[in-house]
Amino acid sequence: MTEKETATLSFRGESYELGVLPASLGPDVIDIRRLYADADAFTYDPGFTATASTKSAITYIDGDKGVLLYRGYPIDQLAEQGDFLETCYLLLHGELPTHQQRRAFDKKIIYHTMLHEQMYKFYNGFRRDAHPMAVMVAVVGALSAFYHDSTDINDENQREIATMRLISKMPTIAAMAYKYSIGQPFIYPRNDLSFAGNFLNMCFAVPTEEFKPNPILTRAMDRIFTLHADHEQNASTSTVRLAGSSGANPFACIAAGIASLWGPAHGGANEAALSMLEEIGGPENIPEYIARAKDKNDSFRLMGFGHRVYKNFDPRAKIMQKTAHEVLAELGVKDDPVLETAKQLEQVALSDPYFIERKLYPNIDFYSGITLRALGFPPSMFTVLFAVARTVGWIAQWKEMMNDPKQKIGRPRQLYTGPTERDYVPEGNR
């Protein structure tokens, strides 16, 4: 029998034995749960970048090797050989579905895409120029006011109903936010279309014409959803778990995740990449901006290149690169300086020694930004589409937490650096 591994911490002349929790992949984790009780000390880790807040069997990332696995399956295999709803089933249940399981799951999702009719009136309370993410946060949070029969987190059946509702209704909510922002009538969902095809229909169809989803564009949309479905314990996922740890209903938890995703350092990266391309203006300006990016004294940074987690390459970017090129070829986009700038900037980054040595390859945000623009979405919708995809990951993480008998309410500690205790001074004596 192998002896249980431990770590020893020396602190203020005392030694403390800390347990080590083994991982199936990646680094093992030192268990510090008893540290405060035994040593009267906390650990300091801003951003929790070196702290495991939970155990999870859903998603694995190896940033150094460029690996992303959903339940053990490489992301490129799922995106190229499977589709989004199959990926949803996998994330939720841990295994790929059989044919019968797949048919039953797809039907549950596709036949529950309509919203409560009163919710259509809810949109009228927003200004027309409201950001779609602001609308989405509010509407998703309001779902708990319309679907009272799926807010009891202690009822497994209600948790399952809430799961199906969130995945199925999120595209409808997002499409309505888009239609409202451009002043067009809402388009009801269609049960005869695929998940991605239905979403494109709700976004781009108009009552006066029949809409036929292009299979290449539909496949691209499906891949974008699959590639963004989950990404381990990132800011928004951690937000969903933290909100859920308090016992909040699932709709409130997902609304909290959407709010976190809204931040430009998280879900807004593809929008930032497109804004950068628009700032560059045209291919003729690329040399100037490349020079600025290399200048340490210049504040300009190329957005959409490199990744905080992936130190080598982003495994999702390879699939997204292929998808972007397929979409641009299918649409035959010409005379668009932004997309032409993107294509030429990509070639520079893939060939310039400066970028190669620093591993500043185009990431998923670079390719998804230009793909979504080509599909016809404005930058304000980019993060909304991210939220549609990530909803299943958030729910899978939330459900995993709810089924964990050891889960506790989140309560991070702090290193207090404020004043020591002092007495109150009456106003006249200050």
Image: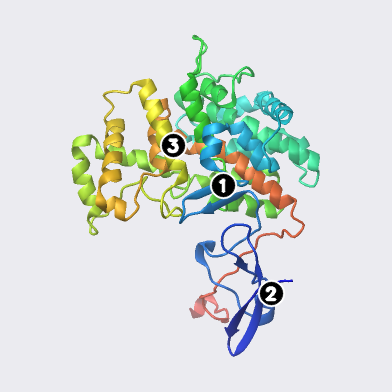
Q: Which residue is mark 2?
A: 34
Asked if residue 14 lies left or right of residue 150, the reply is: left
Q: Which residue is mark 3?
A: 320
First along the sequence among labels 3 and 2: 2
Q: Residue at x 64, y 52 (%)?
A: 241
Asked if residue 99 lies left or right of residue 329, the reply is: right
Label 2 with label 1: CB-CB less than 8 Å: no
Label 3 with label 2: CB-CB less than 8 Å: no
Asked if residue 233 lies left or right of residue 281, the reply is: right
Bin the neighbour count of mark 3 within 10 Å (Cα to Cα): few under 14, some 14-19, many 20 and up.
many
Quick check: can you spot residue 170?
no
The amino acid marked with disc number 3 is: Met
Bin the neighbour count of mark 1 within 10 Å (Cα to Cα): few under 14, some 14-19, many 20 and up.
many
Asked if residue 293 lies left or right of residue 319, the reply is: left
Q: Height in image: 111 above or below 300?
A: above
Q: CA distance from mark 2 to mark 1?
A: 32 Å
Q: Residue at x 60, y 69 (%)?
A: 413
Q: Secondary structure at mark 1?
A: strand
Please tell me whether mark 3 or mark 2 is closer to you in this view.
Answer: 3
Farthest-out residue, bottom: 13
Q: Which residue is mark 1?
A: 69
Farthest-out residue, front: 1
**What percent of the width, then of the height, locates residue 173?**
58, 30
- In the rendered view of the protein, which quadrant contains the N terminus? bottom right
Please tell me whether mark 3 or mark 1 is closer to you in this view.
Answer: 1
